[in-house]
Image: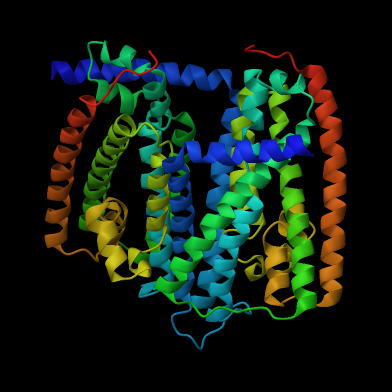
Amino acid sequence: MRKYWQIFKVSFNQEFAYRFNFLMWRVRNVIQILVIFSFWNTIFSNSSQAFFGYDRAKILTYVFGILILRAIVLSSRAVDVAGEISSGNLTNLLLKPVNYFKYWFCRDISSKALNIGFSAVEIFLLYLWLKPPLYFQGDPLVLISFLVSLILAVLLFFVILFLVNMISFFMPENAWAAQFLFIVIILEFFSGGIFPLDILPEFLFKIFSYLPFYYLLFFPLQVYLGKVSQFLIFKGIIIAFFWFMVLSFALLKVWRLGLKAYNAEGR
Amino acid sequence: MKIVRRYLYIWSILSKKSFFVHLTRKLGFFVFLTGKILRFIFFILFLFFILKKTNGIGSYSKDQAILFFVVFNLISSLSQMFFRNVYTFRQSVVSGNFDLILSKPISPLFRVIFGGFDFIDLVTIPPLILALFYAARPLSPDFYQVILFVLLLLNGLFISFSLHTIIVSLSIITLEIDQMVMIYRDLETMARFPLEVYGKKVASFLTFFIPLGIMIAFPAKALMGLLSPRFIVVSVLFGFVFFFISIKFWNFALTKYTSASS
């Protein structure tokens, strides 16, 4: 356990090695949120209007909630795994007495810790500037359900990202293309990072609700907002857990196949 | 004229090289292309669902909001197509490989900005022009508006060139930043919707300080017949002034290059 704590600490300090770069990354997050916030703020400029079951307070809470959830769920260092495989640097870690998945999970947690700290400051400043009407959840049962769905979201994202990175074993030159398609485009949209998924037509929304991406941002936030019944929370947690198990199994399979195909090119 | 011909020839060689690189990564080419097409489809669907309920964004009608979105995509894709090399420039500075560009008998700025024509974006241009045609049709622009649109679109690309020049200059001065071009992209996405959405102060900032308004919103407004002649003159003048400033900044940045790691 101590060695993973050391990995956490080293990784945390590494983020500070490129302070300005990190700051710029956070600036990007704020810009993205400002775009979405302003868009919805204009749509709901007449505060009495409600569209798709959202009024102004709920949609603005959604936007702020996405900012927090992105910091917790989507901030990650494991995005570098593909580069590590294609450059042959994976060999260095395979020779060390650490579990490769645990190593990257520790690095992910350190990245999340830092991003959560910064996003708390950003949220505070944006709150002072934009003064949105926010919704605070007070039901302890809902808050516990939210916490469970959040932990599942973190685990699910780790597995999805790792699975996409595994492409590097078989097609090292296309790893970035795969990340672009699955993580930047599909995951962003299908997880509710750009807009709430329940504004989509019902049949599309139903399809989305059975995909793993739905449980990364949209589902935890819906749980927090109290928009899901206890039965649906339970059902959602079961589906998210199911996806986690299936994708973890697939990841281990692909990892073993990948190691067989790995030639340590570049070393 | 001889210089223009020479640089066109160099550009064609660089573009050919870029094409051959794409050929070696055919699968990557199609995956990236699929991603770009999907992003466009997802956003346009999102806009349709929203506009079906709201009938517009702010003071703009449904058709006008869609036109803003299509013009944004067209100008953004054209910029990425011509200036793609900017995205990999920082690595040349950090590794010291920029020395190899500086030592060649051509303008280093030309080599840095135009060194990697993106054929993935080229594929997206014809469908975007078609989408522009369909998005503009309900607004029935006249011939004069279309000419103004083309003029301001070229001016927009000129401004985009200047912005990319500033980005590569910043990459030389502040080695630490590899997010700069992505911040520009994030700011650029703000022009996906009419800038008035962001309030008067932010809209002015995005129009005249980071001239995304002049680059993207003005051509769209010209096509809708919403831009007064005064603004057309101002935007062309602004394009030239901005170009001049960016070249000055580039020359200043070159004096700060330390050739580290080479």
Q: Residue furthest bottom?
A: A48
Q: Position of residue B130 (x, y in %)?
A: 44, 48
The correct choice, above or below, for A59 with respect to A183 in the image is below
Residue drawn where x is 75% and y is 17% of the image: A262
Q: Nearer the viewer, residue A20 or A28?
A: A20
Quadrant of res B176: top left
Q: Position of residue B261 (x, y in %)?
A: 40, 16
The correct choice, above or below, for A155 with respect to B65 in the image is above
Q: Position of residue A89 (x, y in %)?
A: 65, 20
Q: Is residue B237 left or right of residue B73?
A: left
Residue drawn where x is 31% and y is 32% of the image: B168
Q: Nearer the viewer, residue A131 or A8?
A: A8
**Image colouring:** rainbow
Q: Is residue B116 left or right of residue A88?
A: left
The correct choice, above or below, for B143 with respect to A160 in the image is below
Q: Is residue A182 left or right of residue B120?
A: right
Residue drawn where x is 79% and y is 39% of the image: A1
Task: Name the quadrant of the C terminus of chain A.
Answer: top right
The mark tally for this picture is 0
Residue drawn where x is 29% and y is 57% of the image: B206
Q: Is there any visible trace of residue A206 in the rendered image? A: no
Q: Nearer the viewer, residue B70 or A59?
A: A59
Quadrant of res A52: bottom right
Quadrant of res B241: top left
Q: Is there any visible trace of residue A139 in the rendered image? A: yes
